[in-house]
Image: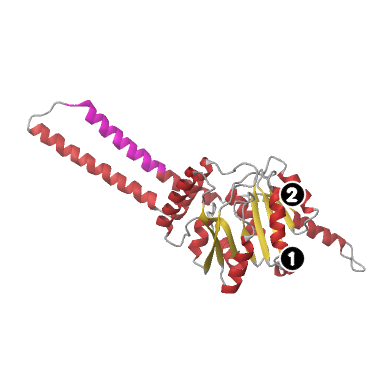
Amino acid sequence: MSTTAEQATTLSVVVPMYNEEAVLPIMAERLRKVLDGLDVSYEVVAVDDGSTDATAAVLIGLRRYWPQLRIIRLRRNGGHQAALTAGMHRAVGQYVASIDADLQDPPELIKDMLDLARSQNLDIVYGVRNDRSTDTVFKRWTAVGYYRMMRGFAGNRVPHNAGDFRLLSRVTVDALRALPEQQPVYRLLVPWLGFPSGTVEYSRERRAAGVTKYPLTKMVRLAADSVTSFSAAPLRLATWLGLAGFGVCIALVVWVLVAYFIGVTVPGWASLSVVLLFLGAVQLLCLGLLGEYVGRIFAAMQGRPAFFIAYDSAEDAAAAVADEEPVPAGRTR
């Protein structure tokens, strides 16, 4: 978009989505009602993360009656954080909100976020869940464990129960874009900035339609990315495990020497097996932890992009406007 468009747009709402054809009409109805009532210029950046269902077709249909809807399609599925990154990098608003398409985070709260940011001159407003009763017991337990672990690694700046539903100022978005992160985890990166922030609490709702796109495997991957992106604690754990293994070995050597000198030299296969298994387990665990970090270094050195843009409706619109501009006399296109 042009610089003029960037200055004119007050709010961008980034909505990453993957196979959300069932919930899109409901989401669009609720979100548009909220945004039209804000009395500010806005755009909705819908990022289709390589969906294999009719998500793209539904978005095109919605855009015919909703000119503020901007469609970005990725060439392949890059994951939730990659889709969120694509939307944030292309959003042009003075404030950028992010929300999932499943409507578990209420879009009506965007007004409160924007009002709070403006009234208190905040760069970040987090949506904090004060009631997760609609989630399964397993989901609640894992969420509690995740946030406790993240606060332990990254400090108390990480808000408890704050996901990817947030509002950021243009300064914050530009700061995030300047970071050299290959696999950004915004739940940790945004608090790490330390910019002035506030919170708005809400009760988490049930998914409006469709099924979750965030199974256990993706939650585990997010936790692993969070830990290895933001802390060297696992490497220190490997060091302590190595020291513990070394201490056990020294104790066993002393025990063997004492047994030899007092004449108790009957060998036992059980103790030998336990020692070998313990040392092998410690070594493999340490190698695995080191491998995670080496893999991240390798990925950073390659510098491969996390996403590839296949289509951006804003670029098509800009090209159409350029084609309609009058050509000065004596010049040709």
Q: Position of residue 190 (x, y in %)?
A: 52, 61
Q: Is residue 54 above or below residue 203?
A: above
Q: Is residue 325 visible?
A: yes
Q: Which residues are magenta?
A: 267-288
- Circle 2 crowding by C-alpha within 10 Å: few under 14, some 14–19, many from 20: many
Decide which of 147, 217 is in the foreground and name it.
Answer: 147
**Magenta stretch, overall SS:** helix
Is 287 on the left or on the right of 279, as rendered? right
The amino acid marked with disc number 2 is Leu
List the residue tagged with mark 1. 2
- Which mark is nearer the camera, 1 or 2? 2
First in sequence: mark 1 vs mark 2? 1
Q: Is residue 239 above or below residue 274?
A: below
Residue visible at 83% across and 58% down?
320
- Tell me the quadrant of the picture where the N terminus can be found: bottom right
The residue singled out by tag 2 in the image is 59
Nearer to us in this view, 308 or 107: 107
Q: Is residue 277 inside the magenta stretch? A: yes
Inspect the image, locate mark 1, and give the three-letter code of the amino acid beneath it: Ser
Badge 1, how many Cα within 10 Å: few under 14, some, many 20+? few
Q: Measure the C-alpha gap from mark 1 to mark 2.
A: 23 Å
The circle on residue 226 is none
> Residue shown at 83%/62% (left/top)?
322
